[in-house]
C-alpha cells in the first residue's frame, strides 16, 4: 500500500483566537494519518503485541518533518489528510502528506521521515535498524505521477 486517506473535522482546541488551525496541529494531524495508515495495513506503529518478540520490535521516531501552508483550515471545517509513501530506504520511510479542503483546495503539504529504531536492552539507547520485512512487505512507493500531482480522488 502506498496511499491512505483520513477525513476529520477541525476541533475548537486546534484553532487559534481567529478560529484558524494553529500551524503546530498540522504536525499532530500528520502523525494521526500515519498511525491510521499502519492500522489500515493491519499493524500498529507501536510494537507492543505479544505476537512480536521484544527483540524484533521497532519504534518510529521522526528524523525530519516540515509543512508548507497554502490556505487556512477553520473551526468545524471538514478536511481530508492524504498520506503518500514517497520513499522507502533500508531504515527510513519518507511520506508526503497533503491536506485537502472538501472543495478540493490544497491547504497544506507536509513531509515526514520516520526511522526504524530498536532500543538496546543493555544501554537503553536507540539505534537505527532495517525496517522489518513484516512491515516492509506491506508498503510500496507511490507512483511518481501521484507524488507529482497534488490531486485527491
Image: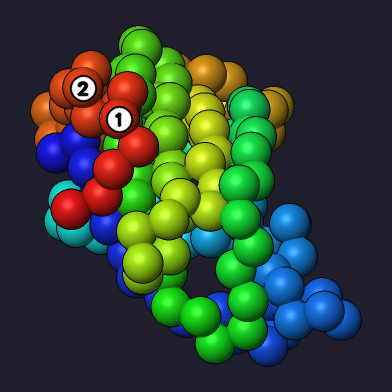
What residue is at 64 percent from the left and 46 percent from the top? 69
What residue is at 23 percent from the left and 18 percent from the top? 144
Q: Nearer the viewer, residue 100 or 45?
A: 100
Please provide percent x and percent y for residue 75: 63, 84
Q: Is residue 151 above or below residue 5?
A: above
Q: Nearer the viewer, residue 119 or 5?
A: 5
The image's mark for residue 98 is none
**Horizontal side, residue 94 vs residue 13: left or right:** left
- Residue furthest toward the top? 90
Please provide percent x and percent y for residue 108: 55, 48
How was the colour assigned to the protein in this rendering?
rainbow
Please provide percent x and percent y for residue 39: 25, 59
- Quadrant in the picture for the N terminus: top left
Please, what secondary structure does the residue beneath circle 1 have? loop
Please, what secondary structure does the residue beneath circle 2 have? helix
| Residue 136 visible in the picture | no
Please provide percent x and percent y for residue 58: 42, 37
Question: Which residue has dot 1 on it?
Answer: 149
| Residue 25 visible in the picture | yes
**Horizontal side, residue 146 vs residue 1: left or right:** right
Task: Determine contact: label 1, label 2, CB under 8 Å.
Answer: yes
**Horizontal side, residue 103 vs residue 14: left or right:** left
Measure the alpha-carbon separation of dots 1 and 2: 6 Å
What residue is at 43 percent from the left and 26 percent from the top? 94
Q: Quadrant of residue 76?
A: bottom right
Q: Nearer the viewer, residue 18 or 12?
A: 18
Q: Nearer the viewer, residue 36 or 75?
A: 75
Number of other residues with Cα within 10 Å of mark 2, as a class: few under 14, some 14 to 19, many 20 or more: few
The image's mark for residue 145 is 2
Q: Is residue 91 above or below residue 1?
A: above
Amino acid at each position: 500500500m502506498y496511499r491512505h486517506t483520513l477525513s476529520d473535522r477541525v476541533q475548537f482546541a486546534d484553532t487559534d483566537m481567529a478560529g484558524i488551525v494553529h500551524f503546530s496541529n498540522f504536525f499532530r494531524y500528520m502523525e494521526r494519518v500515519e498511525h491510521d495508515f499502519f492500522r489500515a495495513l493491519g499493524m500498529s506503529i507501536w510494537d507492543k503485541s505479544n505476537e512480536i518478540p521484544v527483540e524484533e520490535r521497532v519504534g518510529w521516531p521522526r528524523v525530519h518533518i516540515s509543512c508548507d501552508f497554502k490556505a487556512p483550515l477553520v473551526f468545524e471545517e471538514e478536511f481530508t489528510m492524504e498520506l503518500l509513501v514517497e520513499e522507502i530506504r533500508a531504515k527510513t520511510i519518507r511520506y508526503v502528506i497533503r491536506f485537502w479542503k472538501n472543495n478540493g483546495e490544497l491547504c497544506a503539504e507536509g513531509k515526514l521521515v520516520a526511522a526504524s529504531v530498536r532500543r538496546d536492552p543493555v544501554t537503553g539507547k536507540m539505534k537505527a535498524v532495517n525496517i522489518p520485512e513484516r512491515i516492509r512487505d506491506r508498503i510500496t512507493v507511490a507512483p511518481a505521477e501521484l507524488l507529482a500531482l497534488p490531486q485527491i480522488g
